[in-house]
Amino acid sequence: MITGLIMCLFFVCLCFIVQLPQANSQESEWLIQLHAYYAPYANALSSISIFLAYIGGAPLSSGIVLLLSALAYVKKRGDLSIFAITAFVGAVAMGWLFKEIIARPRPQ
């Protein structure tokens, strides 16, 4: 329960963060310089990033959660099945909310 209250407080504080256009442009410049530094490794890093994004994406994650939930239900652990589905739906909802709240423009 304490963890839930801490997360709720964190979420409320996050809602009051004001985005500064100057900070966003400075972040963009820093990312451009960082990209130029790692340019020789760009292909390897891009392929690793794409692979990790695919593994952590909703289609594969939902398949794993449904498989584990079905396995838990078959083993007479309905509570574990409900917990897994609820945790997955909560994680997807929080990810969507954070993307909507922290809407930064993409660098050009």
Image (tube, rainbow, N blue to C red):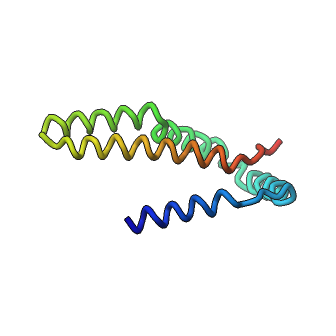
Q: Hey, which residue is sitting farthest left in the picture?
A: 76
Q: Could you tell me residue 86's position as x and y percent? A: 36, 43
Closest to the observer, 47 or 53: 53
Q: Is residue 57 above or below residue 94?
A: above
Residue at 16% over, 43% down:
77
Q: Is residue 26 left or right of residue 8?
A: right
- Camera sees residue 58: yes
- Camera sees residue 33: no
Q: Quadrant of residue 24?
A: bottom right
Q: Is residue 77 left or right of residue 1?
A: left
Residue at 76% over, 59% down:
18
| Quadrant where the image shows the N terminus | bottom left
Residue at 49% over, 62% down:
7
Q: Could you tell me residue 61's position as x and y percent? A: 41, 37
Q: Could you tell me residue 56's position as x and y percent? A: 47, 41
Q: Is residue 25 above or below residue 84?
A: below
Marks counted in the figure total: 0
| Quadrant where the image shows the C terminus | top right
Q: Is residue 60 left or right of residue 32?
A: left
Q: Is residue 69 above or below residue 12?
A: above
Residue at 78% over, 56% down:
19
Q: Could you tell me residue 57's position as x and y percent? A: 49, 37
Q: Quadrant of residue 100?
A: top right
Q: Hey, which residue is sitting farthest right in the picture?
A: 22
